Image (cartoon, helix red, strand yellow):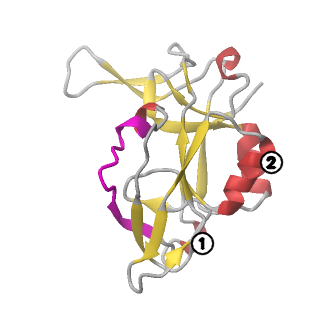
């Protein structure tokens, strides 16, 4: 059976001195397509300004975008990961304007209908009586076959990865990642 994980940033042992994209200049680029898994037809000159000294392979940032190092991009290429769009981004240290080269935004374009509503965890909405809110999704095993990274059609913002990709990231000692396990049925 496949395993699925919610991927998120973790500072790890370099939490206090990690680089963080504290400011961003989107130059007119909308971040709405990224949330919904849409491919960008036009991408401008997006620039992040960082503070901190330790650059993880997953660069934490104010937009919560997946900004990945060249090492991670190489791993994705070697594993033939599909359903992503690499978007160039400029990264500068805020304190001295030094450019950090090679990082790119990983726009996940795989959006699949894989929610197993019966096994997912729900709570009553505090704002909308009678409505339920999804707190922890569960997945249909048959729906995730063939995907290593994706958004849920039913619940867009988080990005999920399979055990295959998670294990490869861990084996390669790539930094800045946390993986929250999710149930698969």
Local SS, label 2 = helix
Is 28 located above or below residue 35 in the figure? below
Point out residue 100 in the picture as x, y percentages from the top left corner.
Answer: 54, 73
Q: Is residue 59 magenta?
A: no
Question: Is residue 39 at all visible to an observer of this figure?
Answer: yes
Question: Is residue 6 at all visible to an observer of this figure?
Answer: no
Point out residue 111 in the picture as x, y percentages from the top left corner.
Answer: 54, 26
Is 90 located above or below residue 184 in the figure? below
N-terminal of the pair, mark 1 or mark 2, is 1
**Would residue 112 be found to the left or right of residue 123 on screen?**
right
Which quarter of the rendering shows the N terminus? top right
* Residue range (magenta): 20-34
Point out residue 156 in the picture as x, y percentages from the top left corner.
Answer: 44, 30
Q: Disc 1 and disc 2: Cα gap in Å? A: 28 Å
Nearer to us in this view, 74 or 131:
74
Is 44 located above or below residue 118 in the figure? below
Checking the image for residue 78, the label placed there is: 2
Point out residue 43 in the picture as x, y percentages from the top left corner.
Answer: 43, 47
Which quarter of the rendering shows the C terminus? top right
**Would residue 134 be found to the left or right of residue 110 on screen?**
left
Nearer to us in this view, 15 or 84:
84
Residue identified by numbered label 1 = 13
**Would residue 146 be found to the left or right of residue 45 on screen?**
right
């Amino acid at each position: 059976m496949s395993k699925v994980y919610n991927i998120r940033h973790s500072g790890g042992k370099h939490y206090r001195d990690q680089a963080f994209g504290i400011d961003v200049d989107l130059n007119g680029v909308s971040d709405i397509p990224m949330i919904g898994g849409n491919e960008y037809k036009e991408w401008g000159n997006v620039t992040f300004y960082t503070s901190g000294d330790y650059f993880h392979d997953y660069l934490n940032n104010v937009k919560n975008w997946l900004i990945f190092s060249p090492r991670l991009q190489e791993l994705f290429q070697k594993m033939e990961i599909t359903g992503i769009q690499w978007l160039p981004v400029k990264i500068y240290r805020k304190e001295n304007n030094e450019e950090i080269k090679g990082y790119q935004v990983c726009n996940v374009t795989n959006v699949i209908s894989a929610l197993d509503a019966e096994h997912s965890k729900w709570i009553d909405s505090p704002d909308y009586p009678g409505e339920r809110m999804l707190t922890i999704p569960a997945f249909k095993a048959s729906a995730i076959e063939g995907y290593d990274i994706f958004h849920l059609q039913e619940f867009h913002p988080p990005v999920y990865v399979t055990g295959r990709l998670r294990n490869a990231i861990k084996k390669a000692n790539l930094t800045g990642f946390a993986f929250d396990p999710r149930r698969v049925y």
